[in-house]
Amino acid sequence: MDDVPLGVLFGTLVVLIVLSAFFSGSETGLMALNRYRLRHLVKAGHPGAIRASRLLERPDRLIGLILLGNNFVNILASSLATIIALRLMGETGIAVAAGLLTLVVLIFSEVAPKTFAALHPERVSFPASFILYPMLRVLSPIVRVVNAVANALLRMLGVPLDEASVTHLNEEELRTVVMEAGAMIPRSHQRMLLSILDLERVTVEDIMVPRNEIVGVDLDDDWEVILEQLTASQYTRMPVYQESIDNVLGFLHVRRILPLVARSELTPDTLRAAIREPTFIPEGTPLNRQLLNFQRQKRRIGLVVDEYGDIRGLATLEDILEEIVGEFTTDPSASIRDVVPQEDGSYLVDGSANIRELNRTMQWHLPTDGPKTLNGLILEYLEHIPEAGTSLMLAGYPMEIVQAKDNAVRKVRVWPARARRHGTTDEAEQ
């Protein structure tokens, strides 16, 4: 080495420092890659992504290869720095060379390349994979030996090595990914994706039309009343029953019989013939399961029944879809018939209004883990049937009972949570 010019030694040392930076940055870049974006790029046929994905299939071999190369060039650089120091400064230069080389390697071969690779993993790892992949094939025997020894040591320490390296997201992690997607996913799409994830938590009871609000055709009514009801109906499908909804016969597709009504050809017999057998939905059925049931049964409507077989309400496919996409309107005050805005900024709300519908439409945050209607929520909170004029603070919303009738709260004045009404107390006034 004494015959080698100093210029060649310095040049070789610089090359080794660059190689050390390459190995350090490659390791950080490959490990910092977004695995889901990587899979997308692999499906798209990106050459760099394909090679990076193959390298990451066996991360132990990849790390073994990178560390093998990194340690080799660092040790060789240290040896060259020692030789240069001896030729320039004698034995006293060894300590100076060690200190300078440590600083240079730390800055230019570790901190700087790893920071850049962590910030821009694809810009580093994809080009690096074109070098590392052939290196792994060439140095595979050495890497296998190194990994075999390292894995044997880990097994002796009780570290399991057979666990799958594939990362899966659970529901909450996927929810976080959607919410933090930012501008990559429009806010309206984010809401729909989150609503889809919530379908498993919501049951048909949360979206059904209550039993007392079901509009149907009673065959015991006069024929003229039935005809008028069919022609004026705003619903496409209606339940048909006799005497009460408990004796339901099926569902009627109104649009299919309107031409018969227009031609005066509809008779009680043809009406009965057009009835399709009813679909019953057990209460507590999650919306995601019921959506699949509707799809499999080719139905769009069903009656919700409790454990005793009594009818609790009516659920439709449209109601489930509205849980995903929201109400089909842009005016919050008009999108729910049970809410009437007042001049003082409050809202007059029907006691039978569904809480989930109120929260979704009015952007409120009333509790949904108990009663399904505003009346039920108030009765649960007060533990008695209140009189008109009773004021209360429920979940941060000032409320006043406007009308109570037939053992139920019929009308409630609700102030938005941010607008506190003067004189409203935190406790219900008796």
Image (spheres, grey):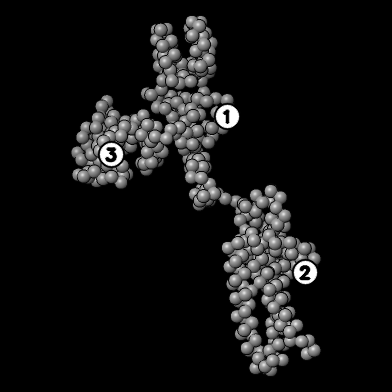
Cβ–Cβ under 8 Å for marks 3 and 2: no
Question: In the picture shown, does residue 299 fall above or below 136?
Answer: above
3 or 2: mark nearer the eye = 3
Read off the residue under disc 1: 295
Q: Residues within 10 Å of mark 3 (few under 14, many from 20)?
A: few
Q: Amino acid at mark 2?
A: Ile
- In the rendering, at what x and y percent does residue 159 appear? 63, 64
Question: In the picture shown, does residue 101 fall above or below 272?
Answer: below
78 sits to left or right of 407 = right
- In the rendering, at what x and y percent does residue 181 appear? 52, 50
Nearest the viewer among 428 and 324 is 324
126 sits to left or right of 181 = right
Read off the residue under disc 2: 142
Nearest the viewer among 88 and 425 is 88
Disc sitting over residue 4 in the figure: none
Q: Amino acid at mark 3?
A: Gly
Residues under labels 3 and 1: Cα distance? 43 Å
- In the rendering, at what x and y percent does residue 354 appear? 38, 33
